[in-house]
Amino acid sequence: MTTQIQNAEAFAALHVKGQPVVLFNIWDAGSARVVSEAGATAIATGSAPVAMAQGYADGQHIPLEEALANAARIVRAVDVPVSLDFEGAYATDAEGIKANVTRALDTGVVGFNFEDQVIGSSDLHPVEVQATRVKAMRMACEDAGIPAFINARTDLFLKAAPEDHSEAMLDEAIARAKAYAEAGASGFFAPALKDEVMIANLCAAVELPVNIIALPDTPENSRLAELGVARISYGPVPYKKMTAWLGDQAKQALESLS
């Protein structure tokens, strides 16, 4: 039986610049099993689909206990590494982060998405504050003896329209990536970044494996690989497509005798 440590090591090894791991995000044990059986080498939750599937809005509105119980069911359902979108770790201070990460690791997950936005706000944590938070997460993983993959996410680009993405923003993202790396991050996630030149420059400037989300108008996966991306995720896209299909099918069935 594969141990949690072995899963963590295997998951980290999947992140190779130019040969990205594809993570087709899921929301519960059933969807995890479907994606695993499709050939996925790892499973990753998305905070938005997990919340929406349980009737909550995104942004840590799903209670921590429910989120962790869901993660535990996912881990039990598949035989591949599982990464948890942990948003802001449900805490602002280092001790709270460490406590919650310890609880999350008890579910069997081996990776975390950890974002730098202030939950419930349009602001980002200052880089030095978020670096301290990343360090707390890493310390919790070390204390548990699990070399978990910390995918440090910046919401810089997500909070601005694509036409407003600038070189100054890219410079700040690079600075954040370097600070998070020094604090113990394993990867760097820049959701909503779509410009090929900026993606390539980010991958070249940052030692960490870079994660890009496959949103509409994002370069094709093969092109992202050429640009140096090491991880491609899908966020809420699979869930939204699935629920759109479900609603359409339900409508057809309900109107079938009209």
Image (tube, helix red, strand yellow):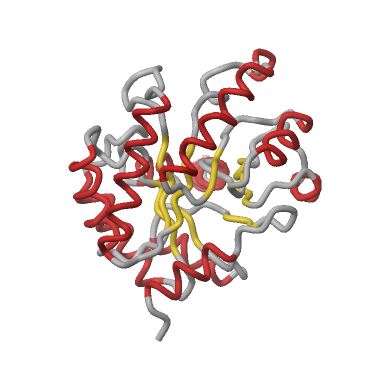
Q: Closer to the camera, 153 or 194? A: 153
Residue 69's place in the image compared with 87, above or below, is below
Q: Residue furthest front?
A: 182
Left or right of 40 in this view: 49: left
Taking the spot 49% from the left edge, 69% from the top edge, the residue there is 9
Taking the spot 27% from the left edge, 54% from the top edge, the residue there is 140
Q: Residue furthest top?
A: 164
Taking the spot 40% from the left edge, 53% from the top edge, the residue there is 84
Residue 153 picture location, percent across and down: 48, 37
Residue 121's place in the image compared with 51, above or below, is above
Residue 29 picture location, percent across and down: 39, 63
Q: Visible in this render: residue 11?
A: yes
Residue 110 picture location, percent across and down: 40, 62
Left or right of 252 in this view: 98: left
Residue 70 picture location, percent across and down: 30, 57
Q: Which image quadrant for residue 37?
A: bottom right
Left or right of 187 in this view: 164: right
Q: Closer to the camera, 172 or 25? A: 172
Q: How many marks?
A: 0
**Image quarter of the N terminus:** bottom left
Q: Which image quadrant for residue 189?
A: top right
Taking the spot 69% from the left edge, 15% from the top edge, the residue there is 163
Q: Visible in this render: residue 252?
A: no
